[in-house]
């Protein structure tokens, strides 16, 4: 190794086939589906394993996601990459919308407006990202999410608009 090379680190993760979970979308309410994921009855989406999320809570109109800040989240500046932060904010906001949907209704994100307040590092500890509904109509829903460090300091926040639509009947 030269002076500029350092010993590398590695990370391995596994996930289940996302088609198993996707096939269930719309067959129950959004809240029932999220609670089944939380309870391990159906697999969580692979993105949660990818970023290292350790769990979440779900009730109607409110979802909280937990993830320890880790080195593998870092950008070249030595802090958690904004894309990882946006992923947590989008997950909490989108799942919050999902928690309000009846069986047979799906959603997709239309936008995500994000504000980064403070740098996030491994010293931030376990991150808590809370999503809440702002408004939900027949065709769109608006949710917000807030990211906190383990001491309760606000690190980032976002607002998301989601399009709501009927899902085709399952065969």
Image: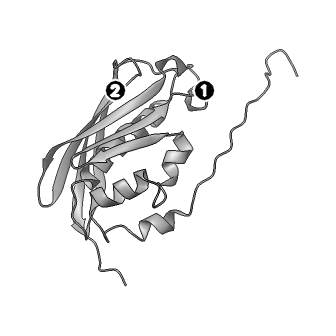
Q: Is residue 96 above or below residue 24?
A: above
Does residue 143 show up? yes
**What colouring does the structure picture have?**
one colour
Q: Is residue 171 above or below residue 15?
A: below
Residue assigned mark 1: 71
Camera-nearest residue between 36 and 73: 36
Residue shown at 35% from the left, 43% from the top: 57
- Name the secondary structure under disc 2: strand
In the rendered image, residue 108, in percent from the top left (x then y), is placed at 30, 57
Tell me the quarter of the image containing the C terminus: bottom left
In the rendered image, residue 110, in percent from the top left (x then y), is placed at 27, 51
Q: Which numbered marker is on residue 130?
A: none
Q: Which numbered marker is on residue 156?
A: 2
Camera-nearest residue between 146 and 159: 146
Q: Is residue 167 above or below residue 18?
A: below
Q: Quadrant of residue 75?
A: top right
Q: Quadrant of residue 148?
A: top left
Residue shown at 63% from the left, 52% from the top: 14
């Amino acid at each position: 190794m030269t002076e500029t090379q350092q010993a590398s680190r590695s990370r391995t993760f596994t996930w289940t086939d996302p088609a198993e979970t996707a096939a269930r979308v719309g067959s129950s309410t959004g809240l029932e589906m999220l609670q089944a994921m939380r309870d391990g009855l159906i697999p969580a989406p692979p993105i949660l394993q990818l970023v290292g999320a350790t769990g979440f809570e779900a009730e109607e109109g409110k979802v909280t996601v937990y993830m320890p800040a880790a080195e593998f989240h870092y950008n070249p500046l030595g802090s958690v990459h904004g894309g990882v932060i946006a992923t947590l904010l989008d997950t909490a906001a989108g799942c919050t919308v999902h928690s309000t949907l009846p069986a047979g209704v799906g959603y997709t994100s239309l936008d995500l407006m994000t504000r980064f307040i403070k740098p996030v590092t491994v010293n931030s500890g376990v991150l808590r990202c809370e999503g809440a509904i702002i408004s939900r109509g027949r065709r769109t829903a608006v949710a917000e999410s807030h990211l906190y460090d383990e001491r309760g300091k606000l690190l980032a926040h976002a607002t998301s608009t989601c399009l709501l639509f009927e899902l085709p009947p399952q065969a």
